[in-house]
Image (cartoon, grey):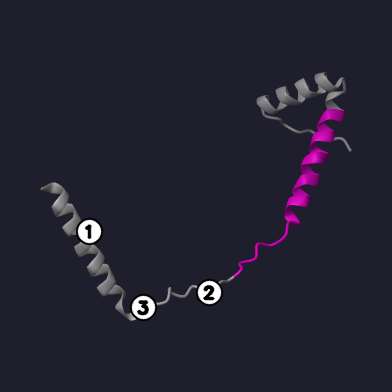
Amino acid sequence: MRTTVTLEPDVAAKLKELAHRRRASFKETLNDVLRKGLTSQAKAGRSEPFVVKPHSGGFRPGIDPDKLNQLLDQLEVEDFSGEARSAE
């Protein structure tokens, strides 16, 4: 099939350089690059779906979830009192 394609200058330069290194024609190089790109796109679409593996998110023994605000307050007081001692 014959068609006209407008390539960006940087893409055309890379294709010409690749064709020169391979000692192949521009047409052969362009077709090879397109085939590889299209094949990799098809393979990328067939990847395995990501599966979330749930796990128990419970608290450690001795932690009462109903008293988390009290624990936070206690930690803030301890942090504040530790800073006050270090400033002296």
Q: On screen, 19 above or below 79? A: above
Q: Quadrant of the N terminus?
A: top right
Residue beneath the point at 58% across and 71% down:
54
Verify whether residue 12 appears in magenta: no
Residue 56 tag number: 2
Q: In terms of image quadrants, where is residue 34?
A: top right
Tell me the residue that label 3 is attached to: 65
Mark 3 Cα within 10 Å, few/some/many (few <14, many 20+)? few
- Rendered location of residue 50, percent (x, y): 65, 62
Determine the residue positioned at 14% across, 52% down: 85
Question: Gap between marks 2 and 3, in whole Å?
Answer: 15 Å
Q: Closer to us: mark 1 or mark 2?
A: 1
Judged from the image, the secondary structure of the residue bearing numbered disc 2 is: loop
Q: Say if mark 1 contacts mark 2, CB within 8 Å.
A: no
Front-lying residue, 70 or 34: 70
Residue stretch in magenta: 28-53
Q: Is residue 49 magenta?
A: yes
Q: Where in the figure is residue 75, as x and y percent of width and height?
A: 25, 64
* Percent coordinates x, y for residue 61 in the rendering: 42, 76
* Residue 48 in the image, given as x and y percentages of width and height: 72, 60
Q: Mark 3 vs mark 1: which is more N-terminal?
A: 3
For disc 1, the marked residue is: 79
Q: Amino acid at mark 3?
A: Pro
Residue found 76% across the figure and 57% down from its top: 46
Q: Secondary structure at mark 1?
A: helix
**Residue 6 drawn above or below residue 72:** above
**Residue type at numbered disc 2:** Ser
Q: Mark 2, residues whose alpha carbon is within 10 Å: few (<14), some, or many (≥20)?
A: few
In the rendered view, does 86 fall on the left or right side of 4?
A: left
